[in-house]
Amino acid sequence: MRGRSIEHDPNAAELQREVEIPAKRCGGEAESIEEIFTVNGVVRPQIEIAPKERQFWRIVNASADRYLDLQLDRQTFEIVALDGMPLAYRDPKHPTRVTDHLMVAPAGRLEAIVTGPPPGTGSALRTLCVDTGPVGDPNPEMVLADLVQPGSDQSGAYSAPRQAHAIDNHPPVYKPIDVESLKKTAPDFIVNFTEDKNGFYINGRKFASDAPPMTSVRVGTYQHWRIVNETAELHPFHIHQVHFLAYAQNDSPLPHPAWLDTVNVPYAGSVDVILDFTDPVIKGMSLFHCHLLNHEDKGMMAKILFK
Ligand SMILES: [Cu+2]
């Protein structure tokens, strides 16, 4: 999924109608709609799926700065992995989670099994309205793609490439860990997102390529971080190389704690995470940042040293 700018597109109104953006406003932001989503470069393609057929889908939010709140009409996502990490890796007893919608922040990834709807009932993949906050960008509901039955003679149907994949028979590797005690400790590090008319900041500082790391961590450890968003818009926190367990939002336990590398941080709110720095291969200088590219480019990024 990518964003396509319609700001200067003479067909903007037509494109908005094609993806069925509702007339009623979404969220508090009064700006006009500047972007729509495309799927593999196509505006509202058709995805062929037979009734009861189970397909494995990989969805990447590759837009620069738009959220997806994914929903399949009358169908569910059987989530297998988030942000490239199989759910089973940390929780072998719960390898999948079934949901009817899921927020995927910019840079977020979802792998899920989708089942074809019953004969004669179409379905659509859509994103719902995301209220990005009083100073956020418009992020309206729209249709991303239509699910159609194969051979239903609808022109322009997008067929997923059918490739033979070699199946390797290595047994799966699981690595459940106990982080309960870490959740109870005070945060090892606090990331504070702020902004003003001159830019975007982490802990009061704009990114500088020649600055020393803002923090350093010892390889082999876990850390509890709190990410605090003091602004009036959403920011997705993203870190390179490692994953974290997002388990609380605004000091309340999340209903579905998940291992991620990108997490939405609510405006005027916070998220608590446990970061995993135990991979001995992951060493050296790395980065964490807001994954709205416009914010990152204007300073909301910092270095971290894994030592
Ligand atoms: Cu941001």
Image (spheres, rainbow, N blue to C red):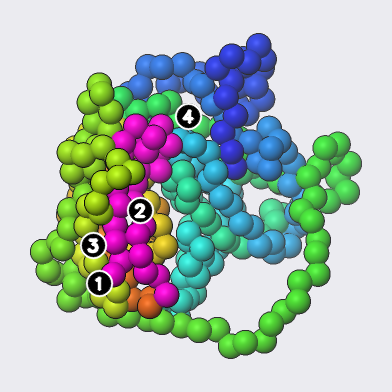
Q: Residues within 10 Å of mark 3 (few under 14, many from 20)?
A: some
- State yes or no: residue 301 in magenta: yes
Q: Residues within 10 Å of mark 1 (few under 14, many from 20)?
A: few
Q: Which residue is mark 1?
A: 218
Residue at the outermost top position: 10
Q: Which residue is mark 3?
A: 216
Label 3 element class: strand
- Residue 77 in view here: yes
- Distance of label 4 from label 3 (alpha carbons): 39 Å
**Disc assigned to residue 287:** 2
Q: Amino acid at mark 1?
A: Arg
Mark 4 or mark 3: whose residue is earlier in sequence = 4
- Distance of label 2 from label 1 (alpha carbons): 15 Å
**Disc assigned to residue 276:** none
Residue at the outermost left position: 186
Q: Which residues are magenta?
A: 281-307
Q: Residues within 10 Å of mark 2 (few under 14, many from 20)?
A: some
Mark 2 or mark 4: whose residue is earlier in sequence = 4
* Quadrant the N terminus occupies: top right
- Residue 128 in view here: no
Q: Amino acid at mark 4?
A: Pro
Q: Which residue is mark 4?
A: 140
